[in-house]
Image: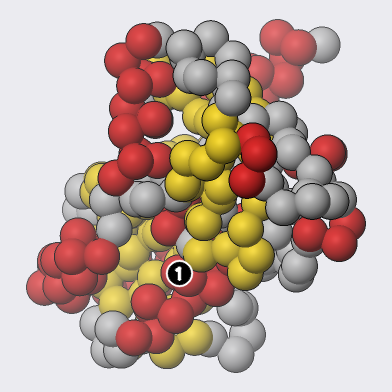
Amino acid sequence: WRKAIQAELQSLVDLEVYEVISRRDVPRGKKLMMSKIVLKYKVFEKRYKARLVVLGFMQPSDDVGDTFAPVAKFTTFRILCAVACQFDFEISSSDVKTAFLNALLNNPIYIVPPKGLGIDPNVVWKLKKGLYGLKESPHLWNVTFHEWLVSIGLQQSPVDPCLYFKPGIFVLIWVDDALKVGTPDMVAWFEAEFDSRFNGSHTAETKMFVGIEIIRDRVARTLELRQTSYIDKVLKRF
């Protein structure tokens, strides 16, 4: 867990998410928000994950801008899987590490660093970029990701705002995940562009996307979608 926490804190530093200031320098009338470290074990990926989050329920309404952020339609996802089978396209995915930390805030927000990290109690963090837990973070990240996708020549679908395309490739986004369906050359092109802008990872043959298992037989040109792990999780809960 210590390594996961250190990696998360280093991401904040690398992306220049905050500025350390004295409590006395916080503008009068600005509310200080609390933060904490959330720990989770990613079963499918077999790794420990730490996330620094802001307690968003403490965020004053006058500090919140637009909050809406679209997610992909499952119909679009299923159609792309069918297209991949029909044309024998690659199905791969890309994940942006600490995605919300890439989006600039419209107005600075002041938070108290998490307890247990040995940070001077007389200092606070002045946020310059989004953090998980802030109400506007999903919207700001979606705008940032959209602007980048358009800048590299992809066109947004008028039917699904989370689908982008150009000849040879389709890209479906779900918050910080991007499902790529296309030719090997175009998938490689996208990943090169992605790596030049974001810190993240790629999965060559995607077997799981937003909790849905993808079972594919390229020789037979067939593909199945299952939610076995989700069903098992629900059964264990009830």
Q: Position of residue 174 (x, y in %)?
A: 53, 57
| Amino acid type, callout 1 | Phe
Residue at the image point whose x is 36% and y is 10% from the top: 2
87 to 67, vertically: above or below: below
Describe residue 193's horizontal placement relative to residue 233 as left or right. left
Q: Secondary structure at mark 1?
A: helix
Q: Nearer the viewer, residue 95 or 82?
A: 95
Describe residue 83's horizontal placement relative to residue 36 as left or right. left
Q: Nearer the viewer, residue 23 or 222?
A: 23
Residue at the image point whose x is 39% and y is 30% from the top: 9
132 to 187, vertically: above or below: above
Q: Position of residue 205 (x, y in %)?
A: 25, 47
Question: Which residue extends farthest right?
Answer: 61
Q: Which corner quadrant of the image does residue 140 belong to?
A: bottom right
| Residue 190 seen in this snapshot | yes
Q: Position of residue 52 (x, y in %)?
A: 54, 31
Q: Residues within 10 Å of mark 1 (few under 14, many from 20)?
A: many
Tag 1 residue: 145
Q: Nearer the viewer, residue 75 or 92?
A: 92
Q: Position of residue 108 (x, y in %)?
A: 62, 58
For the N terminus, give its image quadrant.
top left
For the C terminus, give its image quadrant.
top right
Residue at the image point whose x is 76% and y is 67% from the top: 65
59 to 66, vertically: above or below: above
| Residue 228 seen in this snapshot | no
How has the structure been colored for display?
secondary structure
